[in-house]
Amino acid sequence: MAKATFNATETAEYRKMFDDLDSDKSGKLDHSEVQALLRAAGEEVSYARVGEIISMIDINQDGLIDFEEFINCMSVIKSGGGIGGQSSAMKQFGTASAKAARVLTVKGEGGTVHSISEEEREAFAEHINLLLGNDPLLASRLPMDPTSPTALFDCCKDGLIFIKLINIIEPGTVDMRAVNKKEKLSKFQTNENNNLAINAAKSIGCHLVNIGATNIMDGIPHLVLGIAWQIIRKTLLNNISLKNHPELWRLLEEGEELKALARLPPEQILIRWVNFQLKRAESSRSIANFGADLKDSEVYSTLLHQLDPSRCPLVASHSDKTMMASQVIDNVKAMGLKPFLKPKDIVSGNAKLNLGMVAQIFNANPGLSDLSAEEEEERMSVYDFAGLEIDENNSDTREERTFRNWMNSLNLEGFDGPGSTLYINDLYFDLCGGLPILKLMDRIEPGIVPWKKTHAKPKGRIHTVDNCNLVVSLAKQMDLVVVNIGGTDIVDQNKMLILAIMWQLMRRFTLDLLKTLSADGSVVTEKTVVAWGNTQVSKSKNPPAPIKNLNDKLLSNGVYLLHLCESICKGTVDWSLVISENESEDDMISNANY
């Protein structure tokens, strides 16, 4: 039987698979790499058996598998060739390679191993196609092929897809005038776009760790999937809150205050919601996670039938869980949704993809009745923010959101041991214990916090007040202005005073950062920054008037800052897009966005 041949695309995909399996990048698979891929595929084989497999594939008998031998093996398998022990060895190797390609292990810097879920890669590609498939700017790349091992990474290399997704979450986050949109971009332009995407993602609260512009441009799989998931997660969960869905009032538990419910992260709200609907359906089931608790499809079956009984019949219990999961997917489609996970993802308990589908279901049909007038009045009382500037259409203030997202962008170590990360969901509630502020202070001025004097697990108000008193004491050591601020003000969530501390900490962090960039390491003051800015913009062709301080009204129309950007990087600003005379408020906002 003739061996199968592969076209250029298939050969490129096999090359990508081979390169990913070749963890030491030697160009050949050695004994340890073959054994590792067999283990990754769930096969524990002896050292001798690994040697037998290699010998059956290794044409030149050098004890290694190079790419030519690898693709020859795949060709033999595809054509059904091979005899006896050779056929068995090749099939075992080929099957293991395919499985390993579903969850690849890639070595990063320092020998760190990262797992790449191909199921998630396919699902993310599907979701991007769903959201952006009709965008004319992306017509040359979307829809992408979800089954391709490289399509997602290639399509996202220039940052445009991520920028478009971010603007779906919060319209106007990235001004598209500042984006490089040509079909072919230089490395510099691609890098600019990716920096825009990363900074914009952080500004909307995405939690990005060790992801840089070059990582996206180089298509580093685990890092691209990391930022993709953070942004996709936001597209799915952004509207799941008490503010956007006041009917979530129904999820209040006995003795619970609405404020506590309002502070729950979207994932916890969804778990509450699923259990609420299960209880309404008189089911004995409940969930505590989006993984193992959904694997048997019974919860999905009950939930969908409760929400839409006419289009979602109950799924009969069966020993074949994949068949049950397929019927669940059919019911989701019957609701008019396009799920991006597959039956096997439900059966395997993929928590990310299950979270995505539950969010899709909620967004389409939460199945909760409207609030009464009395309930609505009580709900609105939660958002009395003591005179702070409030957007009537937004429950949190601009300041709260800014400081919360800033803290999250710093990737501070959490309280669950090494490797955990601190995440702030509600600035006032999450900071009122004092410990997160101490973490922030220790980042800004390492060693300032005497951790042995803190209460890591405070028992009662007295311990919490002690922690917050320490915050105030250290703030004085850091030369922050904390007149008339006490630890109890933080514990009692005095919003104005907490914002005052956070503003000063952010300012200190920024000035310290500038200090590290100064030539001699000298202290950088606001006066220094203003003087530098005026010197820079004076070099412009038509320089604006100099500013006196960072509160100068000359900054309000954005023109000064655009001149500053242009002075740092020539050609950055397209001046035909800037309105510099007789600006209206809309013109000033347009300049500021640009």
Image: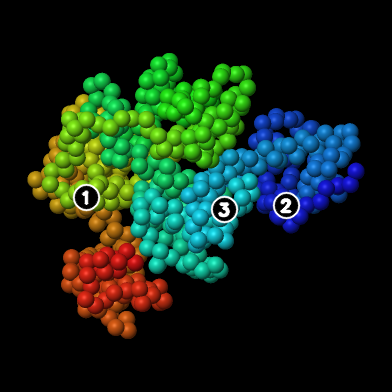
Identify residue for label 3.
143
Give the number of the disc on residue 391: 1
Identify residue for label 2.
10
Secondary structure of the residue carrying tag 1 is: loop
Outermost residue to the front:
310
Question: Considering depth in this image, is 258 or 100 the residue closer to the camera?
Answer: 258
Three-letter amino acid code at the position of disc 3: Pro
Secondary structure of the residue carrying tag 3 is: loop
Question: Considering depth in this image, is 480 or 344 the residue closer to the camera?
Answer: 344
Between the residue at mark 1 and the residue at mark 2, the CA separation in whole angstroms equals 53 Å
Three-letter amino acid code at the position of disc 2: Glu
Could you tell whether 484 is left or right of 423 in the image?
Answer: left
Between the residue at mark 3 and the residue at mark 1, the CA separation in whole angstroms equals 37 Å
Quadrant of residue 77 within the rendered picture: top right
Q: Position of residue 363 (x, y in %)?
A: 40, 38
In this rendering, is residue 592 above or below 234? Answer: below
Quadrant housing the N terminus: top right
In this rendering, is residue 335 above or below 184? Answer: above
In this rendering, is residue 507 above or below 566? Answer: above
